[in-house]
Amino acid sequence: DTGVSQNPRHKITKRGQNVTFRCDPISEHNRLYWYRQTLGQGPEFLTYFQNEAQLEKSRLLSDRFSAERPKGSFSTLEIQRTEQGDSAMYLCASSSNIGGAFFGQGTRLTVV
Amino acid sequence: AQSVTQPDIHITVSEGASLELRCNYSYGATPYLFWYVQSPGQGLQLLLKYFSGDTLVQGIKGFEAEFKRSQSSFNLRKPSVHWSDAAEYFCAVVASQAGTALIFGKGTTLSVSS
């Protein structure tokens, strides 16, 4: 068990570019979550997968955001046409049940 | 809508002193409650959780929390703080009985003075 792995750890991109982040959950976990965290705030829920099905999306997840979890394993989060307001830490978490999610170290996105 | 309030943005305690971090939730049904800790440059780590049963739950690193339904609170405590406990602490509640997303408070930053 190597924990939840996120790549890249840091990403700097120019406004208007597309970016994609990857999350590898703990292998036996069927639930996967994406959160966003800005400075001085708690993590905010973006979306949730159970296996390969995306079951819930926050209203924070605008049309520019898309997430996938093919085959119920790793997940990707893509942001199209990035804006400066997208700058944040993007956190991935996984769990096997309702018993508390395990978080990765996050991908810090800076849009310049 | 479900929400979590952590009234204290920043707390400083002396090393060896006791600690209590406050958390209040707003949720109609029986809540599932969690405390997480985030150290600089580190991911969120689960300290403890409450689902049902005994209202005093024990966690890792010597932390405990008490669920008080009458006060809608789930305060985190530690009898003797160590310098390594300096971090940001987040209280969270599960949004629904279906058990999906965690809703987090804004966090409390703990500083430990020597």
Image (spheres, helix red, strand yellow):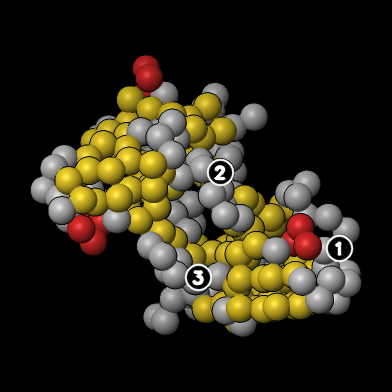
Position above or below: B12 against A101: above
Residue A42 at x, y percent in the picture = 54, 49
**Quarter of the figure with residue A61:** bottom right
Residue B99 at x, y percent in the picture = 56, 46
Q: Which residue is mark 1?
A: A64
User: Could you give the CA–CA distance between mark 2 and mark 3, rounded to whole angstroms?
Assistant: 17 Å
Q: Which residue is mark 3?
A: A104
Task: From the viewer's side, name the closer residue of A29 and B112.
Answer: B112
| Residue A96 seen in this snapshot | no
- Amino acid, disc 3: Gly
Image disc number at residue B103: 2
In front: mark 2 or mark 1? 1
- Amino acid, disc 2: Ile
The answer as to whether the residues below labels 2 and 1 share one chain is no
**Quarter of the figure with residue B70:** top left
Task: From the viewer's side, name the closer residue of B78 and B83.
Answer: B83
Task: Please report whichever mark, 3 or 1, sits nearer to the chain's N-terminal start.
Answer: 1
Q: Are marks 3 and 1 in contact (CB under 8 Å)?
A: no
